[in-house]
Image (tube, rainbow, N blue to C red):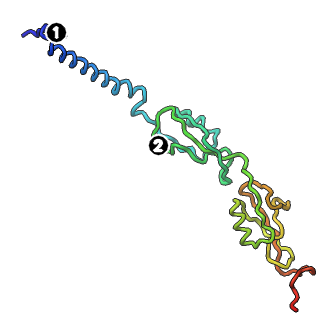
Amino acid sequence: MRFDFLKFKRDTLGGMLLQLLLAFSSLVVVALLFFNVYLPETTLHDRSLTVPNVEGMAISQLDELLGKRALRYGVNDSTYSSAHPPLTVLRQYPPAGSKVKAGRMILISINRVDAPTVPVPNLVDASVVNADALLSGNELKRGRIEYVSGPFRVVKEVKYRGRTLAAGERVPKGSTVDLVVMDGEGELPEDSVGLENE
């Protein structure tokens, strides 16, 4: 049996249906090739890399480590932590163990070289307990307490590396400051008001 193409001329219903069928089937073939051949090759589908853990590493080691894995890095932020050396990676995104494509940029947050400075709070005439709270609130640490003679048990001076500080002076964040505290056993000044009972 022979197929007769003449029955399906362009101006007949059969011809129009045949043309629609050919157009639809060619569209399906193009779509299948696009989604199953072209797109997976272009987007490297099913070819992912595991992100290594770079937290705690020096930034100078990242080029070699990430370069071997076809990954890049970019500095997203810098903060200060006294617990880590300068220029050390503190955080990363995406996190370690994530699956990414080759060439992906790993965003990192590094430890600053210099600590930011914070103002010294006014601790003069404050109790030691209050001074501890104020120091902690300003991200400073209390070091030694040096007792001197004085009538009240309050802070007389604040020192940093042996130098007396005034309120508002700036020191590196996380610094340890020493307190000079009166022992409460000294004499009251003679010009004190309201000490005599009459």
Percent x, y for residue 160? 81, 60
Viewer-proximal residue, 91 or 128?
128
Q: Residue furthest top?
A: 6
Q: Are marks 2 and 1 in contact (CB under 8 Å)?
A: no
Percent x, y for residue 81? 66, 52
**Residue at (71% x, 68% y) in the render:** 132
Residue type at mark 2?
Ser
Q: CA distance from mark 2 to mark 1?
A: 59 Å
Percent x, y for residue 57? 61, 44
Which element type, helix, strand or loop, lies under badge 1? loop
Q: Residue furthest left?
A: 1
In the image: residue 81, left or right of residue 15: right
**Depth-wise, is mark 2 or mark 1 nearer the camera?**
1
Quadrant into which the N terminus falls? top left
Residue type at mark 1?
Lys
In the image: residue 129, left or right of residue 152: left
Residue highlighted by disc 1: 9
**Residue at (92% x, 79% y) in the render:** 191
Which class describes the residues within 10 Å of circle 2: few (<14), some (14-19), or many (20+)?
few
Quadrant into which the C terminus falls? bottom right
Viewer-proximal residue, 154 or 11?
11
Q: In the figure, residue 83 lies in which quadrant?
A: bottom right
Residue highlighted by disc 2: 98
